[in-house]
Image (cartoon, rainbow, N blue to C red):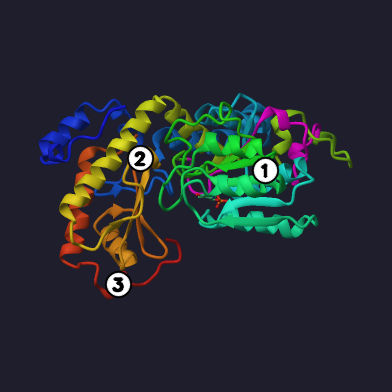
Amino acid sequence: MARAPDPAFLASRAQLEALDRADELRRFRDQFELPAGVIYLDGNSLGALCRRARERVRETVEREWGEGLIRSWNGADWISMPQRAGDLIARLIGAGAGEVVAADSTTVNLYKALGTALRANPSRRIVLTERSNFPTDLYVASGLAKHDGSAHEVICVEPGEGAIERVLAQRGHEVAVVTLTHVHYTTARIHDMRGITAAAHAAGALVVWDLSHSTGIMPLEVESCGVDFSVGCGYKHLNGGPGAPAFIHVARRFHHLVQPITGWMGDARPFEFLPEHVPAMGISRFLSGTPSVVGLAALEASVEVILEAPMAAIRRKSMALGEAFVALVERHCAGLGLELASPRDASLRGSHLSWRHPDSLAVMQALIARGVIGDCRPPDLLRFGFAPLYLRHVDIADAVMHLADVLRTREWDREEYRARPRVT
Ligand SMILES: *Cc1c(COP(=O)(O)O)cnc(C)c1O
């Protein structure tokens, strides 16, 4: 694996430009629509628009919808889009063809995956997760536990090395499902998917992994890790656009199970309009309602672009950009109140970094006003994401220079930067 450039090596702009010239993913930047004057460090929250997605959406709206009208369900094969996009995503997560569909939101897919896993393990009572998991994951788990009448209990462990494994060692015989997010949404710390899945299975529990912050940005091997169910987000590193359809992966051995949101699109014969539900064969039974065609068009096109880049190269560059950011912050922002909240070692984290700062919200607003776009997470985190397909090393250097400037001059300390927007 390529190591990060020596911090001293990052000293001059010419050297950063040399790194960018040698970048094996260099040709991808042109495939994205990036506004002038913006350094976009939030592709982990809303991926940038790629040209192919824009064109595909235009074609879908103007020709398929505008001219084809309802005929396009067959003529443009809209009806197969969840499976088609799912098969592309399967290649990114190391699942088999026919094990993934793209549909609904991550939240809804979590409900389907967890609900199915609980039914598959009916004698167990515990759902095991960690307290710092993404809130929607916790809300779905506790909502299901309250609603499904079987008195499941959600146990939230404090995050820490080996914490899940310790509970499994003590109470594993009671655990129905372990559900975790692979790359943490604030710290970016990576969970050991293979080890935790093996430990859960050894205890007789199933696993549901949330791959929202990992899909499209690092090699994943759900099949070889023995993962039972996974879900993930379409609008982060997959660049599928705001509110893009998410995905659900179900290992083939569970395709006989019935998921809790039984709808007509998961039925074997939806257009026979029969009163009794007969689940479709295979992954299609994990669909519920009508596919979101325009969203799927964007998602499918953007995932095609990602699949054209070698995943090992994406990971290499993601790590190199992160390491450059850390090295530059440590050099240029020393003593300015930042504290790294992510693992220092790039191999232990996904493709974003969080830094504590007591005035994180105002600092980020000031940065955004300068065109450097990241985001904030409570209580005090500045978060920056690195999208290897369109970011350059020089962008990282420029972003850190802005950050150092904003902090050194206290430019953030203005009334206008204190108001909390509705969406952060
Ligand atoms: C972004 C994210 C989600 C988003 O869920 P939606 O239903 O798409 O809003 C869920 N889980 C994790 C871990 C995420 O990072």
Sequence order check, earlier mark of 2 and 1? 1
Q: Nearer the viewer, mark 3 or mark 1?
A: 1
Q: CA distance from mark 2 to mark 3?
A: 29 Å
Q: Is residue 199 left or right of residue 352?
A: right
Picture residue at 45% right of the left edge, 26% below the top: 307
Q: Which residue carries the number 3 mark? A: 416
Q: Which mark is residue 387?
A: 2
Q: Nearer the viewer, mark 2 or mark 3?
A: 2
Q: Residue furthest bottom?
A: 415
Q: Amino acid at mark 2?
A: Ala
Q: Is residue 210 left or right of residue 188?
A: right
Sequence order check, earlier mark of 3 and 1? 1
Q: Secondary structure at mark 3?
A: helix
Residue 274 located within the stretch drawn in magenta: no
Main SS, magenta region, reads loop
Q: Which mark is residue 402?
A: none
Other-residue count near label 3 (Cα within 10 Å), few / some / many at <14 / 14–19 / ≥20: few
Give the extent of the magenta segment. Answer: 240-269
Sequence order check, earlier mark of 2 and 3? 2
Other-residue count near label 1 (Cα within 10 Å), few / some / many at <14 / 14–19 / ≥20: many
Q: CA distance from mark 2 to mark 1?
A: 28 Å
Q: Is mark 3 within 8 Å of ligand 1?
A: no
Q: Is residue 372 left or right of residue 287?
A: left
Picture residue at 73% right of the left edge, 31% below the top: 255
Q: Which residue carries the number 1 mark? A: 113
Q: Secondary structure at mark 1?
A: helix
Where the N terminus falls, by quadrant?
Answer: top left
Closest to the observer: 283 or 119?
Answer: 119
Percent x, y of residue 292: 61, 42
Give above or below for 79 relative to 372: above
Closest to the observer: 106 or 155?
Answer: 155
Where the C terminus falls, by quadrant?
Answer: bottom left
